[in-house]
Amino acid sequence: MTSGDYAEENREINEREYDFDALKRFVEFKTGFVAQLEREIVGQSRVLEDLLAAFFAGGHVLLTGAPGLGKTRMARAIAKSLDLKFNRVQFTPDLTPSDLIGANILQATSTGERLFEFLPGPIFTNVLLADEINRTPPKTQSALLEAMQERQVTVAGKRYELESPFFVIATQNPIEQEGTYLLPEAQLDRFLFSLKIDYPKASDEIDMALTTSGIETREIAHIVTREEVAESQALTRRVVVARRVAEYAVEIVRKTRPQMKNSAESTQQYVEWGAGPRASQGILLAAKAYAAMAGRPTASYDDVDRAAPNVLRNRVRLNYLAQADGMTVDFLVKMILREAREELEGMRD
């Protein structure tokens, strides 16, 4: 970053009187969180950090990975570490919206009257694991939209607030496509991150096999209280983003849109539809989270570079030519980031 960037950020930090003690506690928590979960989830430290960043940025995560890589175990461990309530829903073709959000049930009172009483569904929790979300029809998938965006559900015209924090981790199996339903664009746009879980290294897989096949079980302790969780989420929001860094993030997103004059050449060739303004917001929120986790009160260009692939992965739609040429969203975003960096360095010179 240039001296002008730092000067601008320092002025904003002084004006906001940033709580550096809280930031230090946040870093200590992040270190302890990852260290504890690494004993439970072997070889996935980067994914754990990304999940933590999404959580403290107030977003939701779509996890894609083959069976047996610990997606369910990961979600459950995160909830327990943060002292939060956890529910898991297996999405199936016959799952209905009322199975997820709840329904009004006719109940008999002590006086003999019969009244409708709302029976909350599993969505009323802090951490919701939507397992194999693409196996249920769009009608049920859309039941999550209001909850993810507005932190509430509506049943029979009455609104019910969800408890804060509310964090959705949805999983997809990339291997089996038969009997699945593609998530609509509006649904994908509600996920802050789309993360991919790869197979672990050989040494990590050996440790995983030894850990899960023994007699001894490792208990996951509560690292923070709910009050500290709320404090950390507020702390993330207060991280400063210089205008130049925000311009860089927005420029990256605009380069994914083929209809823009300044879009990347690869975008013009391979992209059918680019990311919307929510992607710019998501990148900045995630960059703030990464900065706070690193102990910095200001977000940098590097934070934007780390956030961009996770945010854009589920928001850029490739065309048929991209599929024929073997182009992926990850590789496309990598080229866009390289081009944006070169332009940034050219402006500095």
Image (spheres, grey):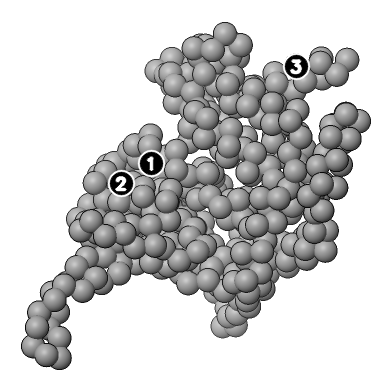
Q: Residue at x 58, y 37 (%)?
A: 281
* 107 is higher (above) or lower (below) than 248: below
> In the displayed structure, would residue 176 be above or below residue 100?
above
The residue indicated by pointer 2 is 142
Q: Residue at x 70, y 26 (%)?
A: 248
Q: Which mark is residue 343?
A: 3
Mark 3 or mark 2, earlier in chain: 2
Left or right of residue 220, residue 25 in this image: right
Residues tagged 3 and 1 counted as in contact (Cβ below 8 A) = no
User: What mark, if any, has residue 187 been given in the picture?
Assistant: 1
Instruction: Identify the mark nearer the N-term, 2 or 1.
Output: 2
Write down the quadrant of residue 307 in the picture: top right
Pick the front one: 63 or 150: 150
The Cα–Cα distance between marks 2 and 1, rounded to whole angstroms, is 7 Å
Provide residue 185's location: percent of width, then percent of height: 38, 34
Q: CA distance from mark 3 to mark 2?
A: 40 Å
Q: Amino acid at mark 2?
A: Ser
**Residue situated furthest bottom in the rendering:** 110
Of all residues, the one furthest to the right in this rendering is 3
Where residue 274 sits in the image (x, y, percent)?
49, 23
Badge 3 amino acid: Glu
Residue 111 x/y as whole percent: 11, 90
Q: Is residue 279 left or right of residue 108?
A: right
The answer to whether any part of residue 24 appears in the image is: no
Element type at marker 3? helix
Task: Look at the numbered discs 3 and 2 and tell me whether their residues touch, using CB distance below 8 Å.
Answer: no
* CB-based contact (under 8 Å), mark 2 and mark 1: yes
Q: Which residue: 10% across, 79% down?
A: 114
Q: Nearer the viewer, residue 77 or 304?
A: 304
Report the disc number at residue 116: none
